[in-house]
């Protein structure tokens, strides 16, 4: 086994354990707490999943760095070396309010290049994964590259923060140009929607590195587009306004955002 095959096998094992842990604990008291606002929540599950993953990564890969949402990782100021991005539960609000539409996410980058990515939709038991050069798979079954549809030819996914709060009317115009807007509330699962071809684009503002790190690998593997609103590459050391999309929808959306 190569080092990356070994890492992939370990991650699959860890994700399987986390799924069992979530299913076992999800009906217990989640200790829901507010972070920065009344719709910015964290539960004991977010914290404990991140803590477990960080402990495992440090044990097996002591040289590597970890960037995680809930603060168990490292402070990282460059993309040098191997960096793991962990979002223990992406879609915490959905986890608390819907008990579905959330995902456990891991992405591994080496010297700034995405090597592996995992978005695990726990309730549907669908693990979306990618390893560099091998495309994107769902439960081991490779996804076809989506058709290169334009903005007019498909639905888009968007973050509700962007659609509801931004007062840039251009965002609504983009939605109106498309066939319709869908909002799931999980950046990871919305990246998967783009990878599956269910939507032609995912447009979202102020996403954190762990929200975008797996989707970026998926886009790369499928030959799709992943840029900021100003058509720059996405920088995983900062928060970004992002567009993940087909190549044709990318042209349409960037033209509208920068007109
Ligand atoms: C959030 C979700 C949401 C997105 C937010 C993220 P969290 O992640 O991905 O869809 O709009 O910007 O912060 O906090 O549930 O992991
Ligand atoms: Ca959060
Ligand atoms: Ca997230
Ligand atoms: Ca999270």
Image (cartoon, grey):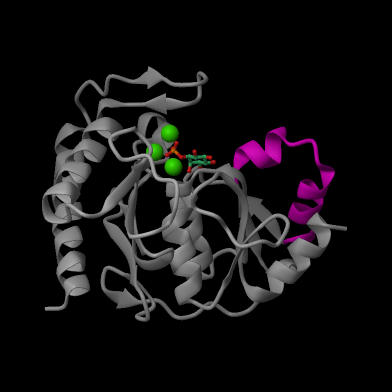
Judged by its main secondary structure, the magenta piece is helix
Q: Is residue 61 left or right of residue 212?
A: left
Identify the image quadrant of the N terminus.
Answer: bottom left
Identify the image quadrant of the C terminus.
Answer: bottom right
Farthest right residue in view: 259
Q: Is residue 193 left or right of residue 202?
A: left
Ligand 3 visible in quadrant: top left
The answer to which quarter of the image holds residue 26 is top left
Q: Nearer the viewer, residue 215 or 173?
A: 215
Count of marks, rendered view = 0
Q: Nearer the viewer, residue 134 or 29?
A: 134
Q: Is residue 33 above or below residue 84?
A: above
Q: Nearer the viewer, residue 90 or 75?
A: 75
Give the percent coordinates (x, y) of residue 31: 28, 19
Q: Which residues are magenta?
A: 159-178
Give the percent coordinates (x, y) of residue 248: 70, 75
Q: Is residue 116 above or below residue 91?
A: below
Q: Is residue 65 left or right of residue 112?
A: left
The residue that appears at 28% across and 35% down in the rendered structure is 72
Q: Is residue 118 visible?
A: no
Q: Nearer the viewer, residue 61 or 128?
A: 61
The answer to which quarter of the image holds residue 227 is bottom right
The answer to which quarter of the image holds residue 247 is bottom right
Q: Is residue 183 visible?
A: yes
Query: Is residue 177 rendered magenta in the image?
Result: yes
Give the percent coordinates (x, y) of residue 197: 53, 70
Give the percent coordinates (x, y) of residue 116: 33, 66
The residue that appears at 38% across and 38% down in the rendered structure is 69
Q: Is residue 70 left or right of residue 149?
A: left
Query: Is residue 53 rendered magenta in the image?
Result: no
Q: Is residue 19 above or below residue 244?
A: above
């Amino acid at each position: 086994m190569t080092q990356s095959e070994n890492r992939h096998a370990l991650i699959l094992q860890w994700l399987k354990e986390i799924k069992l842990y979530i299913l076992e604990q999800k009906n217990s008291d989640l200790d829901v707490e507010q972070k920065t606002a009344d719709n910015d929540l964290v539960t004991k599950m977010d914290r404990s999943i991140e803590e477990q993953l960080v402990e495992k990564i440090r044990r097996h890969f002591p040289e590597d760095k970890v960037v995680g949402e809930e603060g168990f990782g490292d402070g990282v100021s460059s993309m040098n070396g191997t960096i793991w991005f962990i979002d223990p539960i992406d879609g915490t609000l959905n986890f608390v309010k819907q008990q579905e539409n959330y995902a456990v996410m891991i992405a591994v980058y080496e010297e700034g290049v995405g090597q592996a990515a995992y978005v695990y939709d726990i309730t549907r038991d669908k693990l979306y994964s990618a390893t560099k050069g091998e495309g994107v798979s769902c439960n081991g079954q490779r996804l076809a590259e989506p058709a290169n549809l334009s903005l007019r030819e498909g639905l888009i996914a968007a973050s509700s923060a962007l659609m509801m709060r931004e007062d840039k009317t251009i965002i609504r115009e983009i939605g109106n140009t498309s066939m319709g807007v869908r909002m799931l509330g999980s950046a990871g699962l919305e990246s998967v929607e783009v990878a599956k071809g269910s939507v032609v684009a995912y447009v979202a503002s102020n996403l954190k590195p762990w929200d975008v790190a797996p989707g970026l690998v998926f886009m790369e593997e499928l030959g799709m587009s992943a840029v900021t609103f100003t058509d720059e590459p996405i920088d995983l050391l900062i928060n970004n306004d992002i567009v993940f999309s087909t190549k044709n929808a990318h042209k349409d959306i960037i033209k509208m955002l920068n007109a």
